[in-house]
Image: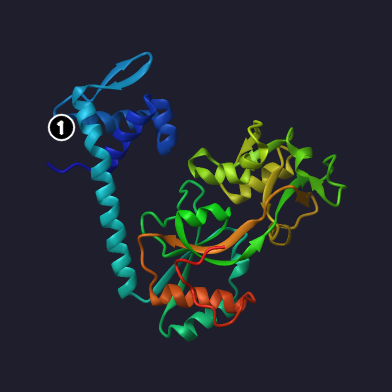
Amino acid sequence: MDVDTRLLRSFAAVCEEGQLTAAAARLFVSQPTLTKQIRQLEALLGVELFERSRRGMAPTPAGRALAERAGTMLAGWDDALRATRAAAAEQGSTLRVGFEGSTINVMTRNTVADFTRRMPGWQVELRQNNWFDPTSGLATGEIDLTLWHAPPSLSGQYNVAVLGEEPRCVALPAGHRLAGRAVIDFEELLEEPFVAIPHESGHWRDYWLAVRERGGRPVRIGAVAHNADEWLAAVVCGQGVGFAPETMSRLAAREDVAYRPVRGLAPSQVGLYWPKEREQTPAMAAFVQSCRATVGAPAGREARPQERR
């Protein structure tokens, strides 16, 4: 019997959420579609997987037995997929690099030219990071390296070649009461509504809402954006303010948005990240060297997985 992994992921989401509505939102499918997928899986297996009630959906004994094993099966498939993609990448001649909208400034035409000089016959494929995937494609092996503005603590979860650091600023709609300030104290922003990124972005949502610096004080959410254009539009329309890398003030400069430094907000670590379990390939090392050479980092500095800030 062949079972689509998509059905297993849908089953696992319903088990974890305990209801169809939340699971459907998490999977970005409609509730009828998710219901159809669960019934399809039950038909394939010939068992009932859930007890349905007004309070939600609870796994049956058969459902609990599958839930105990589904995670391992899906993790095994994800590992196989990563290994397959990594092997294909090492035999190919394309380095896949993820980037945030504001980190693309790290790479220039000179960066790519320097890389192709170091790795003749290779090319760089750039992919903008997906806000709905906290790993930006690293977990599935869809990309080889990703550029992140991140808290230094993320170095404990990934290999990282540090390229520098950059302050986080606040983006305010023109005419905001604080827009006339040269520098804004973090405390002055605590009661402001913020434009947040999706819950699915995991720790990135908390980082760009500066949850750690808030010391337990709640965040007022004025709007939720699903991409950089939506985020900026929400700020322009006065639905909230938001923290961003300082480079965004140059890359997305507008007369109707004021970008201001924030006193009391820690800077981001800018670096190239890749999974701890993946060894750095010659192409990955060459790209790190090229980034450092074209952004003014010390010459001759080798990229090493153990490097930490």
Return the residue found at the far right: 180
Q: Mark yes or no: residue 149 visible.
A: yes
Q: Nearer the viewer, residue 34 or 47?
A: 47
Examine the rendered structure and indicate whether residue 50 appears above or below residue 157.
above
Which residue is at 24% across, 28% downward? Answer: 39
On the image, numbered disc 1 is attached to which residue? Answer: 45
Examine the rendered structure and indicate whether residue 38 appears above or below residue 247.
above
The crowd level at tag 1 (other Cα within 10 Å; few <14, some 14-19, many 20+) is: few
Examine the rendered structure and indicate whether residue 307 appears above or below residue 227.
below
- The x and y percentages for residue 94 are 40, 73
The amino acid type found where label 1 is placed reads Leu
- The x and y percentages for residue 87 are 29, 68
Which residue is at 22% across, 27% downward? Answer: 63
Q: Please, which colouring scheme is shown?
A: rainbow
Residue 205: name its quadrant. top right
Secondary structure state at the residue bearing disc 1: helix
Which residue is at 76% across, 39% downward? Answer: 187
